[in-house]
Amino acid sequence: MNKKFYITSAISYPNGAPHIGHAYEFVCADAIARFKRLDGFDVRFQIGTDVHGQKMWQTARHLGISVRQLSDQNSDVFQKMADIFSISYDRFIRTSDLDHHTASQSIWNTLMKNGDIYKNVYSGWYSVLDESYYEEHETYRDNNGIRFGLQDTPVEWIEEESYFFRLSSYGDKLLRFYEENPDFIAPKIRRNEIISFVKGGLKDLSISRTTFDWGIKVPGDQAHIMYVWLDALTNYITGVGYPYSDSPLWSYWPADVHIIGKDIIRFHAVYWPAFLMSAGIELPKKIYAHGHLLKNSQKISKSSRNGVDPIEMIDLYGVDPLRYFLLRNIRFGSDGNYTHEEIVNQTNAGLSNNFGNLAQRSLSMVFKSLDGKFSESGLPNLQDTILLELSDTMLSKCREQVDLYQPNVALDVIWSVLDETNRYFNEQAPWNLKKKDKERMGTVLYVTSEVVRQVAILSQAFLPDSATRCLDQLNIPRNERSFAHLGIKSRLSRDTIIEKPKGLFPRFLATVYD
């Protein structure tokens, strides 16, 4: 049986429309999920929406619609965006799903049974926008006297009866776990941030609210709604069958990685592990926090109102060009910036002028000069062999980078081979060989096409539509497109016959776009 691999993105909060930052996280997680599937893993990939909480309740009241209606219509938009971006999820979960209510109430009961939940009165600073509690020292006042929290969102003082989770008793356990599992939190800067936070001392966490009623009821106390983060984090185990350990999906747990944004690292690397420890559930293997996406060097957020509709961006650039830019030009784990000019220039250079141009030139020559056949190619010389051997190293190098959660470096590996192949193709100049050495021309075209085949197979993880069309043009059978068909043991068949190829990537004009 293939080794299992469970990957999740954070579930998005649908109190407004999605922006390109949401798509970025989906795309990065999707590239890893697709790569693992192509590499023979039994992958489960989950994304979704977190529809509960005070923000949703307030937004719905402001719009004059029911919170259920807001939840459904906005979740539909997020799911549509995921589909348009070719996100290969196995489940799009919504925290309004019935099985999630069962899972959330079950973990609550377990935490209560194990003595980690008690009732008291909460008083302190709360950010509705972050759905987060803040200590006094984590807030500040602006020049107008308005108080803000760590994420620069307004906070308000609240006092209400609440259930609490004994987070304070898990500080030493968490620090010991971090020490024994140094790769649990990545990148390193986030690990250091969390360790510092936990060493500063943990206070018990308020985990229920009574001032609104949109959420999951606390078992046995209908006046209380479960704190949105306890509810939301539980989605990761809901999706694999919790609380039913006999579910066939439960074999995917623990998750191999939760892909999240750096602004929610505390919830995932402190609260979530503590909840799981209390419940006696194995912890996920890794929490990987990516950076923020900046537009013209400004952070994209709903509160800033500078988010660009990702579906409009797809209409402008296309799915794979936008996926390529997001995956290759932003170091995963760091903040990344984009402008219209950068997207145009990078996709023209990397896709149209490099991958697309090489495939079009080589396959067009095969079709025109060799009647679409590779049967006239001869034995490879030293230069051919060096290029083929270089292409054979791509898989191991890419695998290493994907395991480090660096899809951008994996793409650098592939594109460095494309650079070498373009140089080879220009130096060999097969168009000059047609009359004086047709066999040699056939060999050059075969070697180039074989590299294009390997690049296309690997690129399915990152550019699924374009890579599939390239493999279709090479007439590669559907059952020969996994990573098992890379390398010297699985070359392009010389019996292959191709049809007239079509361009893979259009060039973009650097027109003004805002």
Image (cartoon, rainbow, N blue to C red):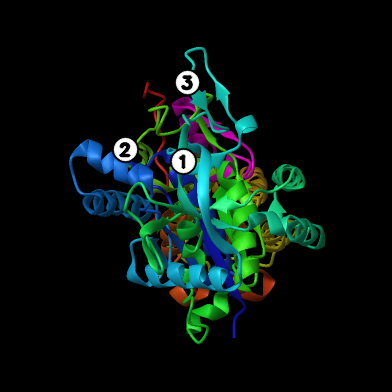
Location of residue 437 (image quadrant): bottom right
Q: In the displayed image of the protein, which residue is found farthest to the top?
A: 143
Q: Residue 282 at what x, y percent from top left?
A: 65, 72
With respect to residue 304, does 209 lie above or below?
below
Q: What residue is shown at x 21% (from left), y 52% (from top)?
A: 69
Q: What residue is shown at x 46% (from left), y 57% (from top)?
A: 232
Camera-nearest label, 3 or 1: 1
- Residue situated in front as seen by the camera: 56 or 204: 204
On residue 400, the disc is: none
The residues colored magenta run 327-351
Q: Earlier in the sequence, mark 1 or mark 2?
A: 1
With respect to residue 505, does 168 lie above or below?
below
Label 3 belongs to which residue?
A: 146
Label 2 belongs to which residue?
A: 312
Give the alpha-carbon distance from disc 1 to disc 2, as whole Å.
43 Å
- Asked if residue 187 lies left or right of residue 234, the reply is right
- Indicate the quadrant containing the N terminus: top left, top right, bottom left or bottom right: bottom right
Label 1 belongs to which residue?
A: 159
Give the alpha-carbon distance from disc 3 to disc 2, as whole Å.
35 Å
- Asked if residue 304 lies left or right of residue 350, the reply is left
Amino acid at the residue labelled 2:
Glu
- Residue situated in front as seen by the camera: 19 or 108: 108
With respect to residue 38, does 503 lie above or below?
above
Q: Earlier in the sequence, mark 3 or mark 1?
A: 3
Tell me the SS state at disc 1.
strand
Tell me the SS state at disc 3.
loop
Q: What residue is shown at x 36% (from left), y 24% (from top)?
A: 513
Amino acid at the residue labelled 1:
Glu
